[in-house]
Each structure stands twice: as C-alpha cells, then as structure tokens.
C-alpha cells in the first residue's frame, strides 16, 4: 500500500516500494555553475538522479519491469533461479526484484577482470557469480560470451534469463517512467538529452518517449573510448553484443576517456551530487558535444522558448562501489593529503 505521504505497508510493501509507478518523481537537479563551462551562454545542465531510486541505481527501473512483465506473462511459474550476464547493478537489482516474485536464487556470468569490490557487492546481495573468460573480440552470439551462455542457461525450464541486452521491457521501462518524468519536470522545454551507453536501455527508452513529444530533440549517446575503462559502459566494439537498435535513437555520438569520467564523477560528488564514473562519462560527452555546437555557432538553434539551452543527462549510480578505482584514473594531486600517514595500521601495500 502506498499513500501520498510516501509510506509503504503490508505484505507487498517492498514490491510496491520498488515499483517506479508508485514512487515520487526522481529528482532533476541542475549541476553547479562551477561544473558548467557554458553557463554564461545560457546553457543549463540538469541531472536525473537515478541513484536516488530505492536500490540506488538506474537498473532498478528495468529490472523491476522485466521481472514484473515475466510474472504477468506466467513465465516465472516453475522457475527456481534467474541467470544474467552482469557484473554489477543490473544483476543485483534483478535478484532483489525476482525475490519479490518468488524467485530466490540468482546466478551471474561475470568477466575475469571484475574488481574484487564488485564481486563482494554481488556476494553481499546474494548473487552467485560465474567467472567467464570473455572473448577478446566479442561478436553477437559468440558461444564464449557470458551473454550467450546466460541465454542458453535460461532455456532450462527451472531457470530464466531476463536478457537485458535484447528484452524490450528493459528500454520499455524508461519509456514508461523515466521519459515522461523528464518531459514533465522540464515543462516540455528540453533542448537536448544525453546518456551513456551500456546495455543502451536507458537511452533508447527515454529517447523514445522524448522524441514522441519532440521529434527533432537531439539525443547524444556517450560511449567509453577504446582501451579506456568506465564500469557499466561500453566501447563501440563491445556494443556489438547489444541486440537493441540503439543507433537509430542516437543523433550524435561522443567518446569519453577514463580520467575525465572519474574526475567529473568526483567533482559532482564533492558538490553534493553523488555520481559514479558512468555519470562523469555522460557529462563529459555532453560537454564535448556542447563545445562542438558552440564552435559551429549552433547553440541558438537549441534555445527553447525561455531562450535557454536546457540539457538533461542521467546519473545512473553513486561512487561508493568504485572508490578503490579513483586513484587509478585521477591524478594524486586531486586528493587531499593524509596527515600522519605513517601511523596507519592498514595502509594498502604495508
């Protein structure tokens, strides 16, 4: 049971609490001017704080939707376990959603290079990892890939594979909830939408709704640069494993490198917006695109009826699961010194 006071009670309280349709709008928050080099040009950049969802990440939306739709279709009858290819937010969100519908066990194919912290997170949430040596040059339907293996395992009558890379209920969740919220929160004055590309569900689903309202709305897709690491995001080569036709929803593409993604993530977090590395990557790509538009003298083409260029990008999750990674990609000068460091008893490497 949900009330206007945002209280959930009863035997299905957690299930209702996870239902995006029964929650207040996810906040839309403008980034500080210190992080917006185009503020003097009348550009406003707002972040959709998907990290404030009940499970703390954007994947909670499609995870709930995929499981609920399978339950409504009767596809969970006789199912004892869920299996997915995921090393983080998606599979732990699926695991928690599935438990609300009676599926207690969750397995996940994870890449051999998964960080120990992310592995501990999966174990914490009761997900059983299956380490997989991913092919160096992934291709669609490669039998060695975790995506393929999870799909085949899901053919067993006692197991289900939600298939985040091909299940239309993944992007459909954002068409149903995220897009309408953003359109309403911006009073229909949105000038540009940008999002990082992982499974591509957030971008496809949100852009689908927004372009239904404004067909000429520019959509910027941000991928991670080749040979650069950003958790949850994909390079163009890795996007080959995604079955969704994400390219048809993207008007402009940008690549972001590890350092700028982690640095912007830390900068937003220090200003009070708890943003993980993929959030920094999305913002980096958006800023790169705005720089190109400004250099080409095209900013005025994006101005809304208020004379502003109103941009929105999602913050998929927070920085805490990745704290051990920041020193790898952000220069040491960005961190304050530790006083009396020699007294530490548990210093790494000691």
Image (tube, rainbow, N blue to C red):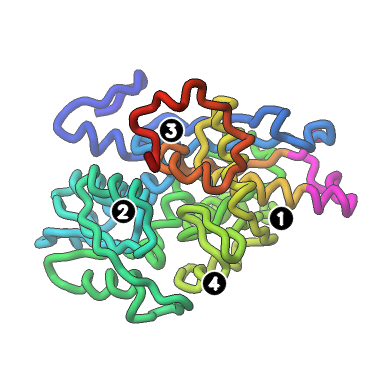
Residue 305 at least partly seen: no
Please provide percent x and percent y for residue 270.
57, 28
Label 4, label 1: how far apart the Cα atoms are: 28 Å
Q: Which mark is residue 216?
A: 1
Please provide percent x and percent y for residue 52.
43, 33
Q: Earlier in the sequence, mark 3 or mark 2?
A: 3
Q: Which residues are magenta?
A: 291-309
Please provide percent x and percent y for residue 81.
16, 59
Q: Which mark is residue 181?
A: none
Near mark 2 (Cα within 10 A), the count class, few <14, some 14-19 or many ≥20, is many
Task: Relative to 239, say whether 280 is above or below.
Answer: above
* Label 2: element kind: helix
> Which callout, 1 or 2, points to the residue nearer the camera?
2
Mark 3 touching mark 1, by CB under 8 A? no
Q: Earlier in the sequence, mark 4 or mark 2?
A: 2
Q: Which mark is residue 237?
A: 4
* Residue receiving disc 3: 52
Instruction: Tell me the residue at 27%/60% (across/down).
Output: 108
* Residue receiving disc 2: 91
The quarter of the image holding the N terminus is top left
Magenta residue check for 342: no
Mark 4 touching mark 3, by CB under 8 A? no
Instruction: Tell me the residue at 34%/23% (across/down).
Output: 6
């Amino acid at each position: 049971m949900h009330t206007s006071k945002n209280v959930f009670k009863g035997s299905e309280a957690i299930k209702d609490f996870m239902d995006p349709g029964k929650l207040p709008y996810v906040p839309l928050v403008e980034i500080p001017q210190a992080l917006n080099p185009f503020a003097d040009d009348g550009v406003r950049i707002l972040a959709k704080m998907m990290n404030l969802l009940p499970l703390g990440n954007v994947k909670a939306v499609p995870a709930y939707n995929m499981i609920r739709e399978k339950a409504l279709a009767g596809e969970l009858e006789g199912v004892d376990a869920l299996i997915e290819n995921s090393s983080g937010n998606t599979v732990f969100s699926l695991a928690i959603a599935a438990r609300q519908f009676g599926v207690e066990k969750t397995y996940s194919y994870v890449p051999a290079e998964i960080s120990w912290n992310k592995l501990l997170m999966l174990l914490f949430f009761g997900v059983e990892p299956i380490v997989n040596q991913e092919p160096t040059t992934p291709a669609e339907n490669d039998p060695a890939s975790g995506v393929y293996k999870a799909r085949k395992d899901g053919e067993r009558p006692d197991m289900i594979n939600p298939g985040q890379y091909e299940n239309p209920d993944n992007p459909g969740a954002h068409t149903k909830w995220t897009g309408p919220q953003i359109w309403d929160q911006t009073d229909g004055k949105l000038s540009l939408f940008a999002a990082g590309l992982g499974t591509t569900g957030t971008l496809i689903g949100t852009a689908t709704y927004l372009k239904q309202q404004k067909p000429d709305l520019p959509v910027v897709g941000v991928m991670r640069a080749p040979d650069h690491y950003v958790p949850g995001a994909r390079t163009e080569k890795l996007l080959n494993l995604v079955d969704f036709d994400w390219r048809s929803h993207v008007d402009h593409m940008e690549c972001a490198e590890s350092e700028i993604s982690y640095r912007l993530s830390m900068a937003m977090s220090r200003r009070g917006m708890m943003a993980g590395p993929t959030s920094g990557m999305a913002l980096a790509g958006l800023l790169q695109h705005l720089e190109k538009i400004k250099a080409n003298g095209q900013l005025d083409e994006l101005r809304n009826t208020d004379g502003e260029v109103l941009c929105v990008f999602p913050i998929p999750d927070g920085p805490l699961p990745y704290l051990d990674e920041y020193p790898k990609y952000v220069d040491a000068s960005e961190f304050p010194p530790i006083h009396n460091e020699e007294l530490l008893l548990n210093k790494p490497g000691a």
